[in-house]
Amino acid sequence: MQREKFSSRLGFVLISAGCAIGLGNVWRFPYITGKYGGAAFVLIYLLFLALLALPVMVMEFSVGRASQKSCAASFKALEPKGSHWHWAGYAGVAGNYLLMMFYTVIGGWMLLYFFKMLTGGFRGMNAEEIGAAFAHMQTSEVGSMAFFMLLVVLMGFGICSLGLKNGVERITKVMMACLLGIMVVLAVRSFFLDGVKEGLSFYLKPDFSAMAEQGIGTVVYAAMGQAFFTLSVGMGSMAIFGSYIGRERSLTGESIRITVLDTAVALMAGLIIFPACFTYGVSPGEGPGLVFVAMPNVFNAMPGGQIWGALFFLFLFFAALSTVVAVFENIVSFGMDVKGWSRKKSVLINLALITVLSLPCLLGFNLLSGIQPLGEGSTIMDLEDFLVSNNILPLGALCYLLFCTAKYGWGWERFIAEADAGEGIKFPKWLKPYLKYVLPFLILIIFVMGYWDKFVK
């Protein structure tokens, strides 16, 4: 059977960017930018984005396009006879399943909050009451969370069931256009708030004293980590889209376009969040607290906040769903490439599987709250996130890196030939010593520091 192809370059770029653009772009990037020195941190981050994540993305795309397979089968198709690189592909598939085990739950929260904002569910509440409402949702609204989680799963696999062109590509194009449109509207709105000057100063003004206070090493590691994780490289999520693209364009240029779009979304998120926080006296916080507690409080104080809040959570939901659809396509393709299933059969089996696998995370805040796998106060979601972010992503990226540079892997010459096929920017060959000897060391630092921060610091 002939492999499906994207109908356009735009589809490839938008879907790949949709996979990279996730909820971490929305709250984590703006927060750590302000925390670690504003524009000074952004410059360090952009440097590491080019030095760490971008080369691995080109490698993932190259492996996918050369093999014409998803990550589960791509290593096997290209590996030297008698080697065992294909085990890395299975680890990548495991990472995709693990990611969806908690990402579908968070996507459900976004959709639930969209309806809560739209119907005035937070009207009249103060910051303390909104915080209590979020805690109540996690511990007591099990049925509602399960319903919206299931809705996310059904929507994601429903889009994948329609096929690459008619489902994944066509609908993701619309969804990404809506996401970017809503972000522009919200960003423009933020420029008319009273706290815009303070918010932009906090976000974009270089603050070297903040860098010194945190420690230069800490700031550099934070920039390395954010640059590496933001593009979701390392578990084959990008390789699948490489297998769907033709050889008319070189892969370095396409990877740069995707990286620029992902970074633009992250930067624009800060333009939306910080002016609002400073206008209404909300201290910027990290993680779910900022999105689920602080922002509803902001919208309560804002004229027309019910509509602006609904738009904000709709934009967050699109960011989540774009990643869900992209990863689901990888999971569906795994069943088709390795098991020989039809698309319909793979969709139905994985729909049931992901639904069941997502339940431990959802129940980890209530019925299974006694299970604290990473120590007191931790949840099942924390464990799943740790396994993906601190293990599968860095080690998977290391596998792609070694596979494309080592003689006992696919090899440098084959990688360059595939990456440079077609018109556009060519991969800089003079980077080989850096990619072969320096970048693996940097990735190992990220891996080791992840354990240090979690269990030692």
Image (tube, rainbow, N blue to C red):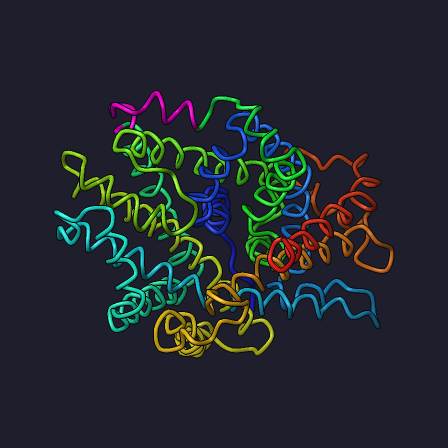
Residue located 69% across and 66% down the image: 88
Horizontal placement of 228 versus 301: left or right? right
Closest to the observer, 402 or 444: 444
Q: Residue at x 84, y 54 (%)?
A: 406
- Relative image position of residue 223 (x, y in whole percent): 60, 38
Q: Residue furthest right?
A: 407
Q: Quadrant of residue 303?
A: top left
Q: Is residue 200 magenta?
A: yes
Q: Is residue 252 magenta?
A: no
Q: Which residues are magenta?
A: 189-202
What main secondary structure does the magenta stretch of the protein show?
A: helix
Residue 434 lies left or right of residue 421; in this view the side is right
Residue 420, percent across and down? 70, 41
Quarter residue 354 falls in: bottom left
* Quadrant housing residue 41: top right
Query: What residue is at 78 percent from the left and 48 percent from the top?
Result: 441
164 or 360, nearer to the observer: 360
